[in-house]
Every structure is written in C-alpha cells, then in structure tokens.
Image (spheres, helix red, strand yellow):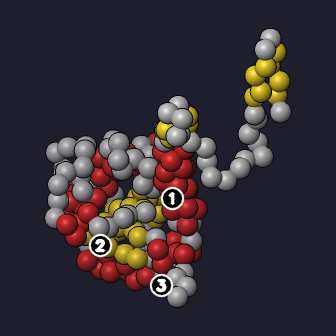
C-alpha cells in the first residue's frame, strides 16, 4: 500500500479563533497534511511534550508522545502566550529547535514580522491564509525532516564497533560516498587515494 509522502507530514496548528483554526485545518488537510489543532500556546507545548515553564521535554500523556510534529503554524495574537512566545519556547528547546515554525497574523506590522523571522520563524503569513501560502510550507518541512535524518545518520556513523579481534573502530556509513578521501599510511609517507 503506497502512502503519499506528504500525508506523513504532521502539522500542529495553533490559533485561539475557532474559525481561523477550522480554516487552517481544512487548508492543511486539502494539502494532504495530517493536522492537530489546539487553541493556545500552552496546549501546543503540551502536544509537543514541553511544559510551559520549562524548555525541556516532560512526561506527558502517552497520546502526546506518539505525535511527531513536522511543523508548527501559529497565530501571533493569542491570549496568554503569543505566537512569538511559543516560537521562542520551541527554538529555545534543544529537542524541538529544529521543528520549523510559521507565524500568521491578520495585522501587517513590519516590526512584528521582522521580530518573528529574526526569532527563528521560517515564514510569516498574513491572514486569511490561502492554499497558495501552504505550498510554501513543503520546503521547510522537508528541510526539518532532512535535519532529523542527517542527525540520525551521524548517530549511526558514530557507533563504535568492537571486532572479533577485540580492537575498536568507528562504524562507517552504509552507503559509500564519492567525496570521501581515504588516507593510506605507510612508513615515512602519507598517500591520499
């Protein structure tokens, strides 16, 4: 059974307005994304496994731990925690900082837009968000996913293997790289292959 690659992408949509939340949910689902919606920044942090008063993941209910969020799209103006505050919490967390965040607002305030982009937001959308805006999300999700895959590859390549002779060596990536240079040591000289 083939699954559309984009259907694997999970977007967390955060907006205190029910109408705006339903609109963004419908647009995201039309674009074949999985969507979870919440009405506040603190609930978004719960879904992400981050408590509001901390920047490290905490133990939360099991259903929240099963959700892998590939992108967060949040309203800027919300009571309690603003979208900018949520952005700063996500980017300040060592475990969540690579999740792309998009901020949206109905107010076109250049200083607010710059503040969010300088704070780590990938995009800033003006409401009402349109289907054409959502097409700009894919590269950010793919970039976030490729960072995760790169980290996973690095972790795998840094695994130490102990051979049957008892000596330790660093594990190599499974796929050969044409850019890799092998060094050959011989007595008194160094040769590059």
Q: Which residue is mark 2?
A: 37
**Quarter of the rendering containing residue 26:** bottom left
Q: Which residue is mark 3?
A: 30
| Residues tagged 2 and 3 counted as in contact (Cβ below 8 A) | no
Residue 91 relative to residue 15: left or right: right
Write the residue at 37% across / 75% down. Answer: 35
Closer-to-camera residue (117/113): 117
| Residues tagged 1 and 2 counted as in contact (Cβ below 8 A) | no
Closer-to-camera residue (6/187): 187
- What separation in Å lies between label 3 and label 1 (alpha carbons)? 21 Å
Residue 33 relative to residue 15: left or right: right
- What separation in Å lies between label 1 and label 2 (alpha carbons)? 21 Å
Write the residue at 40% across / 77% down. Answer: 34
- What separation in Å lies between label 2 and label 3 (alpha carbons)? 15 Å
Q: Is residue 9 above or below residue 140?
A: below
Question: Between disc 3 and disc 1, whose residue precedes?
Answer: 3
**How far across and down, in percent of the image, does residue 143 sit?**
55, 56
**How far across and down, in percent of the image, does residue 123 sit?**
50, 57
Element marked by disc 2: strand
**How far across and down, in percent of the image, does residue 128 sit?**
43, 73
**How far across and down, in percent of the image, does residue 111 sit?**
43, 45
Question: Does residue 96 appear in this view?
Answer: yes
Q: Residue 69 — which label?
A: none
**Quarter of the rendering containing residue 169:** top right
Q: Which residue is mark 1?
A: 145
Element marked by disc 3: helix
Element marked by disc 1: helix
Label 3: how many Cα within 10 Å (few below 14, some 14–19, many 20+): few
Write the residue at 52% across / 65% down. Answer: 137
User: Which is closer to the viewer, label 1 or label 2?
Assistant: 1
Residue 76 relative to residue 185: left or right: left
């Amino acid at each position: 059974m083939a699954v559309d690659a984009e259907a694997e992408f999970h977007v967390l949509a955060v907006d205190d307005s029910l109408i705006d939340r339903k609109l963004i949910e419908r647009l995201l689902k039309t674009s074949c994304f999985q969507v979870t919606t919440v009405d506040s920044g603190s609930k978004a942090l719960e879904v992400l496994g981050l408590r509001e008063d901390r920047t490290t993941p905490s133990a939360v209910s099991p259903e929240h731990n099963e959700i892998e969020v590939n992108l967060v799209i949040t309203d800027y103006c919300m009571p309690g925690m603003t979208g900018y505050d949520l952005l700063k919490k996500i980017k300040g967390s060592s475990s969540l900082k690579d999740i792309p965040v998009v901020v949206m607002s109905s107010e076109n305030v250049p200083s607010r837009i710059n503040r969010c982009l300088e704070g780590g937001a990938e995009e800033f959308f003006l409401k009402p968000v349109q289907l054409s805006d959502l097409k700009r999300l894919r590269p950010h999700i793919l970039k976030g996913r490729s960072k995760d895959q790169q980290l996973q590859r690095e972790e795998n390549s840094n695994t130490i293997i102990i051979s049957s002779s008892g000596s330790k060596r660093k594990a190599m990536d499974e796929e050969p790289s044409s850019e890799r240079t092998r060094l050959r040591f011989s007595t008194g000289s160094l040769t590059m292959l």
